[in-house]
Image (spheres, rainbow, N blue to C red):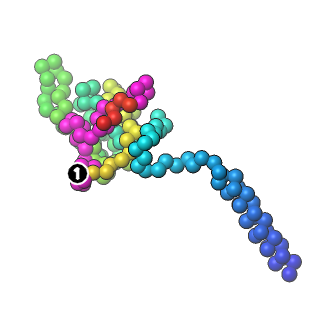
């Protein structure tokens, strides 16, 4: 009987402690953001791993990002050499059906032409529109990189 009353008291006290904790946070501002909320522009952490931002003008077609990718989701094609001896980028495609968003492709780039952006929505009307993105064709609003000085740069 004594252990039964002890267990009942423990259940009541732990429920009361939980209710006090819930009551403390009940009137605070929520930390979540409703999706989509067109009235409020949100900015995420600089370390947010959203969709890639790629600057094809800076790319030297070294294939280091494709070699660093653990799931082989980056396809790069070069169209020969230009008059100055540099390679011509004809296709830079990321298959988001495979991408882990691990950002391992960002670090090896010697010219810093690929970044992780803050765009996270892959909604599209067809499967190819949201899964395979060819950055050399300028597909999507995330083609150009945003700078920290101008948070609205690169948005469509």
- The total number of labels drawn is 1
Q: Is residue 85 above or below residue 23?
A: above
| Residue 64 covered by magenta stretch | no
| Residue 138 covered by magenta stretch | yes
Q: Is residue 49 visible?
A: no
| Viewer-proximal residue among 90 and 128 | 128
User: Crowdedness of circle 1 by 10 Å Cα count: few (<14), some, many (20+)?
Assistant: few
x and y percentages locating residue 15 in the rendered image: 73, 65
Farthest residue in the right direction? Answer: 2
Q: Is residue 86 above or below residue 139?
A: above
**Is disc 1 placed on a helix, strand or loop?**
helix
Q: Tell me the magenta residue range.
A: 125-151
Q: Residue at x 23, y 40 (%)?
A: 139
x and y percentages locating residue 98 in the rendered image: 32, 51
Q: Is residue 120 above or below residue 107?
A: below
Among the 4 quarters of the image, the one containing residue 154:
top left
x and y percentages locating residue 104 in the rendered image: 39, 39
| Label 1 sits on residue | 128
Q: Residue at x 35, y 29 (%)?
A: 153
Q: Residue at x 73, y 57 (%)?
A: 20
Farthest residue in the bottom direction? Answer: 1
Q: Which quarter of the image is occupied by the N terminus? A: bottom right
Q: Is residue 153 visible?
A: yes
Among the 4 quarters of the image, the one containing residue 55:
top left
Q: Residue at x 37, y 34 (%)?
A: 115
Farthest residue in the top direction? Answer: 84
Q: Is residue 132 above or below residue 82?
A: below
| Viewer-proximal residue among 50 and 113 | 50
| Viewer-proximal residue among 77 and 118 | 118
Among the 4 quarters of the image, the one containing residue 89:
top left
Is 129 on the left or on the right of 100, as rendered? left
Q: Which quarter of the image is occupied by the C terminus? A: top left
């Amino acid at each position: 009987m004594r252990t039964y009353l002890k267990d009942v008291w423990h259940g009541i006290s732990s429920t009361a402690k939980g209710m006090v904790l819930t009551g403390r946070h009940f009137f605070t501002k929520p930390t979540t953001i409703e999706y989509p909320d067109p009235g409020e522009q949100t900015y995420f952490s600089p370390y947010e791993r959203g969709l890639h931002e790629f600057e094809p003008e800076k790319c030297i077609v070294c294939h280091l990002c494709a070699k660093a990718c653990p799931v082989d989701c980056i396809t790069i094609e070069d169209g020969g050499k230009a008059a100055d001896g540099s390679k011509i980028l004809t296709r830079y495609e990321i298959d988001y059906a495979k991408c882990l968003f691990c950002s391992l492709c960002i670090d090896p780039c010697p010219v810093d032409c690929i970044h992780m952006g803050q765009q996270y929505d892959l909604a599209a009307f067809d499967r190819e529109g949201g899964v395979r993105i060819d950055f050399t064709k300028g597909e999507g609003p995330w083609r150009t990189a945003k700078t920290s000085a101008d948070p609205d740069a690169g948005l469509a």
